[in-house]
Image (cartoon, rainbow, N blue to C red):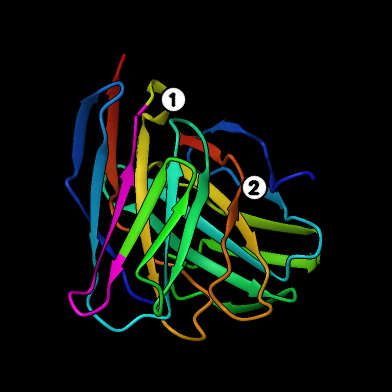
Amino acid sequence: SQQGEEDPQALSIQEGENATMNCSYKTSINNLQWYRQNSGRGLVHLILIRSNEREKHSGRLRVTLDTSKKSSSLLITASRAADTASYFCAPSGAGSYQLTFGKGTKLSVIP
Amino acid sequence: DAGVIQSPRHEVTEMGQEVTLRCKPISGHDYLFWYRQTMMRGLELLIYFNNNVPIDDSGMPEDRFSAKMPNASFSTLKIQPSEPRDSAVYFCASSLGRPRGNQPQHFGDGTRLSIL
Protein backbone atom coordinates (compact mmCIF):
# COMPACT_ATOMS: atom_id res chain seq x y z
CA SER A 1 0.00 0.00 0.00
CA GLN A 2 1.14 3.55 -0.46
CA GLN A 3 0.92 6.57 1.79
CA GLY A 4 -0.69 9.87 0.96
CA GLU A 5 0.79 13.14 2.12
CA GLU A 6 -1.65 15.75 3.33
CA ASP A 7 -1.07 19.45 3.01
CA PRO A 8 -1.18 21.76 4.88
CA GLN A 9 -0.28 20.12 8.17
CA ALA A 10 -2.51 22.58 10.02
CA LEU A 11 -5.27 24.94 8.94
CA SER A 12 -7.19 27.46 11.00
CA ILE A 13 -10.31 29.17 9.64
CA GLN A 14 -13.36 31.05 10.85
CA GLU A 15 -16.71 29.37 11.06
CA GLY A 16 -18.59 29.73 7.78
CA GLU A 17 -15.46 29.79 5.63
CA ASN A 18 -14.47 27.01 3.28
CA ALA A 19 -11.59 24.68 4.09
CA THR A 20 -9.46 23.02 1.45
CA MET A 21 -6.89 20.34 2.14
CA ASN A 22 -4.77 18.46 -0.34
CA CYS A 23 -3.34 15.00 -0.72
CA SER A 24 -0.51 13.85 -2.94
CA TYR A 25 0.57 10.30 -3.67
CA LYS A 26 3.26 8.60 -5.72
CA THR A 27 1.97 5.64 -7.73
CA SER A 28 -1.20 4.75 -9.62
CA ILE A 29 -4.24 4.05 -7.52
CA ASN A 30 -7.54 2.22 -7.67
CA ASN A 31 -9.25 4.64 -5.33
CA LEU A 32 -8.58 7.19 -2.63
CA GLN A 33 -10.40 7.58 0.66
CA TRP A 34 -10.72 10.49 3.06
CA TYR A 35 -11.17 10.04 6.80
CA ARG A 36 -11.82 12.38 9.71
CA GLN A 37 -10.58 11.94 13.28
CA ASN A 38 -12.07 13.94 16.09
CA SER A 39 -9.99 14.35 19.23
CA GLY A 40 -9.99 11.18 21.30
CA ARG A 41 -11.95 9.18 18.73
CA GLY A 42 -11.27 6.71 15.95
CA LEU A 43 -11.14 7.58 12.27
CA VAL A 44 -14.42 7.99 10.46
CA HIS A 45 -14.71 7.30 6.75
CA LEU A 46 -15.93 10.34 4.82
CA ILE A 47 -15.79 9.56 1.15
CA LEU A 48 -14.22 7.21 -1.40
CA ILE A 49 -13.41 8.35 -4.92
CA ARG A 50 -12.45 5.85 -7.60
CA SER A 51 -9.66 6.41 -10.11
CA ASN A 52 -12.13 6.88 -12.96
CA GLU A 53 -13.99 9.64 -11.10
CA ARG A 54 -12.93 13.28 -11.08
CA GLU A 55 -15.25 14.72 -8.49
CA LYS A 56 -17.56 13.47 -5.79
CA HIS A 57 -19.89 15.21 -3.37
CA SER A 58 -21.30 14.24 0.00
CA GLY A 59 -23.24 16.94 1.82
CA ARG A 60 -20.84 19.83 2.46
CA LEU A 61 -17.87 17.78 1.26
CA ARG A 62 -16.45 17.89 -2.21
CA VAL A 63 -13.56 15.68 -3.24
CA THR A 64 -11.63 15.98 -6.47
CA LEU A 65 -9.12 13.59 -7.93
CA ASP A 66 -6.50 14.36 -10.57
CA THR A 67 -4.74 11.13 -11.44
CA SER A 68 -2.40 12.88 -13.90
CA LYS A 69 -1.05 14.99 -11.03
CA LYS A 70 -1.45 12.22 -8.48
CA SER A 71 -3.35 14.51 -6.18
CA SER A 72 -6.70 14.90 -4.49
CA SER A 73 -8.37 17.68 -2.59
CA LEU A 74 -11.07 17.78 0.05
CA LEU A 75 -13.22 20.88 0.27
CA ILE A 76 -15.48 21.49 3.25
CA THR A 77 -17.93 24.28 2.54
CA ALA A 78 -19.52 26.55 5.16
CA SER A 79 -17.38 25.08 7.93
CA ARG A 80 -18.69 24.59 11.44
CA ALA A 81 -16.93 24.31 14.78
CA ALA A 82 -17.85 20.62 14.74
CA ASP A 83 -15.63 20.16 11.66
CA THR A 84 -12.59 20.72 13.89
CA ALA A 85 -10.65 17.48 13.47
CA SER A 86 -7.72 15.88 11.70
CA TYR A 87 -8.30 14.76 8.12
CA PHE A 88 -6.44 11.92 6.45
CA CYS A 89 -6.26 10.67 2.90
CA ALA A 90 -5.57 7.03 2.03
CA PRO A 91 -4.71 6.19 -1.59
CA SER A 92 -4.97 2.52 -2.47
CA GLY A 93 -3.93 0.35 -5.36
CA ALA A 94 -5.97 -2.36 -7.03
CA GLY A 95 -6.56 -5.42 -4.87
CA SER A 96 -5.03 -3.80 -1.80
CA TYR A 97 -6.88 -4.31 1.46
CA GLN A 98 -4.61 -2.33 3.73
CA LEU A 99 -4.37 1.44 4.03
CA THR A 100 -1.39 3.57 4.98
CA PHE A 101 -2.18 6.91 6.59
CA GLY A 102 -0.08 10.06 6.59
CA LYS A 103 0.17 12.64 9.33
CA GLY A 104 -3.07 14.33 8.30
CA THR A 105 -4.25 17.92 8.18
CA LYS A 106 -5.34 19.36 11.51
CA LEU A 107 -8.28 21.67 10.90
CA SER A 108 -9.39 24.17 13.51
CA VAL A 109 -12.67 25.99 12.90
CA ILE A 110 -12.98 29.02 15.15
CA PRO A 111 -16.54 29.96 16.19
CA ASP B 1 -25.84 -1.18 14.07
CA ALA B 2 -23.07 -1.47 16.62
CA GLY B 3 -19.73 -0.24 15.44
CA VAL B 4 -16.31 -1.68 16.22
CA ILE B 5 -16.02 -2.12 19.96
CA GLN B 6 -12.70 -1.93 21.75
CA SER B 7 -11.90 -2.55 25.37
CA PRO B 8 -10.63 -1.24 27.62
CA ARG B 9 -10.79 2.45 26.58
CA HIS B 10 -7.92 3.30 28.88
CA GLU B 11 -5.20 1.13 30.37
CA VAL B 12 -2.45 2.20 32.72
CA THR B 13 0.03 -0.39 33.83
CA GLU B 14 3.58 -0.78 34.93
CA MET B 15 6.49 -1.73 32.75
CA GLY B 16 6.92 -5.47 32.44
CA GLN B 17 3.24 -6.30 32.83
CA GLU B 18 1.23 -8.13 30.21
CA VAL B 19 -1.34 -6.04 28.38
CA THR B 20 -4.28 -7.43 26.42
CA LEU B 21 -6.37 -5.23 24.15
CA ARG B 22 -9.67 -6.50 22.80
CA CYS B 23 -11.70 -5.82 19.69
CA LYS B 24 -15.11 -6.84 18.42
CA PRO B 25 -15.48 -6.08 14.71
CA ILE B 26 -18.69 -5.22 12.92
CA SER B 27 -20.70 -8.35 12.28
CA GLY B 28 -20.17 -9.66 8.74
CA HIS B 29 -16.89 -7.87 8.17
CA ASP B 30 -14.15 -10.24 7.06
CA TYR B 31 -11.13 -7.96 7.43
CA LEU B 32 -9.75 -6.78 10.77
CA PHE B 33 -6.89 -4.33 11.25
CA TRP B 34 -4.85 -3.28 14.29
CA TYR B 35 -3.20 0.17 14.25
CA ARG B 36 -1.09 2.15 16.68
CA GLN B 37 -1.11 5.95 16.80
CA THR B 38 1.53 8.18 18.36
CA MET B 39 2.41 11.82 17.89
CA MET B 40 5.84 10.94 16.55
CA ARG B 41 4.96 8.15 14.14
CA GLY B 42 1.34 8.86 13.29
CA LEU B 43 -0.99 5.96 12.53
CA GLU B 44 0.82 2.69 11.84
CA LEU B 45 -0.70 -0.57 10.67
CA LEU B 46 0.47 -3.39 12.91
CA ILE B 47 -1.31 -6.46 11.51
CA TYR B 48 -4.41 -7.41 9.60
CA PHE B 49 -6.57 -10.52 9.33
CA ASN B 50 -8.82 -11.92 6.65
CA ASN B 51 -11.40 -14.49 7.73
CA ASN B 52 -9.57 -14.83 11.07
CA VAL B 53 -6.23 -15.61 9.40
CA PRO B 54 -3.30 -13.18 9.82
CA ILE B 55 -2.31 -11.89 6.40
CA ASP B 56 0.41 -9.34 7.07
CA ASP B 57 2.11 -8.82 10.42
CA SER B 58 5.11 -6.92 9.08
CA GLY B 59 4.10 -3.87 11.11
CA MET B 60 4.31 -5.65 14.45
CA PRO B 61 7.26 -3.90 16.09
CA GLU B 62 8.75 -6.75 18.11
CA ASP B 63 8.18 -10.28 19.28
CA ARG B 64 6.68 -8.81 22.43
CA PHE B 65 3.60 -8.06 20.34
CA SER B 66 1.18 -10.78 19.29
CA ALA B 67 -2.32 -10.76 17.85
CA LYS B 68 -4.96 -13.45 17.54
CA MET B 69 -8.39 -13.76 16.04
CA PRO B 70 -9.96 -16.95 17.42
CA ASN B 71 -13.28 -16.29 15.71
CA ALA B 72 -15.01 -13.80 13.44
CA SER B 73 -16.26 -11.66 16.31
CA PHE B 74 -13.21 -11.26 18.50
CA SER B 75 -9.54 -10.30 18.28
CA THR B 76 -6.84 -9.56 20.81
CA LEU B 77 -3.57 -7.68 20.70
CA LYS B 78 -1.17 -8.67 23.45
CA ILE B 79 2.04 -7.02 24.61
CA GLN B 80 4.27 -9.04 26.90
CA PRO B 81 6.31 -7.67 28.53
CA SER B 82 5.18 -4.06 28.09
CA GLU B 83 7.62 -1.14 27.91
CA PRO B 84 7.09 2.63 28.28
CA ARG B 85 7.69 3.12 24.54
CA ASP B 86 4.59 1.04 23.86
CA SER B 87 2.47 3.89 25.21
CA ALA B 88 0.12 4.90 22.40
CA VAL B 89 -3.47 4.73 21.25
CA TYR B 90 -4.27 1.38 19.70
CA PHE B 91 -7.10 1.19 17.17
CA CYS B 92 -8.96 -1.73 15.73
CA ALA B 93 -10.80 -1.40 12.42
CA SER B 94 -12.86 -3.75 10.29
CA SER B 95 -14.07 -3.79 6.71
CA LEU B 96 -15.73 -5.87 4.06
CA GLY B 97 -13.55 -7.42 1.41
CA ARG B 98 -16.32 -7.71 -1.13
CA PRO B 99 -17.34 -6.83 -3.80
CA ARG B 100 -13.80 -5.60 -4.35
CA GLY B 101 -10.85 -4.42 -2.29
CA ASN B 102 -10.45 -1.02 -0.78
CA GLN B 103 -13.73 -0.92 1.08
CA PRO B 104 -14.05 1.73 3.81
CA GLN B 105 -12.61 0.78 7.15
CA HIS B 106 -14.66 1.27 10.30
CA PHE B 107 -12.64 2.20 13.36
CA GLY B 108 -13.26 1.69 17.05
CA ASP B 109 -12.57 4.52 19.47
CA GLY B 110 -9.26 3.03 20.51
CA THR B 111 -7.50 1.98 23.68
CA ARG B 112 -5.27 4.62 25.22
CA LEU B 113 -2.37 2.67 26.71
CA SER B 114 0.08 4.17 29.20
CA ILE B 115 3.02 2.11 30.40
CA LEU B 116 4.69 3.58 33.47
Q: Nearer the viewer, residue A81 or B50?
A: A81
Q: Which residue is mark 2?
A: B21
Residue A76 at x, y percent in the picture: 34, 40
User: Start and end of the magenta stretch?
Assistant: A65-79
**Point 48% across, 31% down: residue:** A40
**Point 52% across, 42% down: residue:** A42
Q: Residues within 10 Å of mark 1 (few under 14, many from 20)?
A: few
**Point 64% across, 47% down: residue:** B21
Q: Nearer the viewer, residue B58 or A9?
A: A9
Residue B101: in magenta span: no
Residue B30 at x, y percent in the picture: 72, 71
Residue B49 at x, y percent in the picture: 64, 73
Quadrant in which the N terminus of chain A appears: bottom left
Kindly identify which numbered label has been placed on residue B106: none
Q: Secondary structure at mark 1?
A: helix
Q: Amino acid at mark 2?
A: Leu
Q: Nearer the viewer, residue A73 or B70?
A: A73
Above or below, B54 against A21 in this view is below
Examine the image and state in which quarter residue B106 appears: bottom right
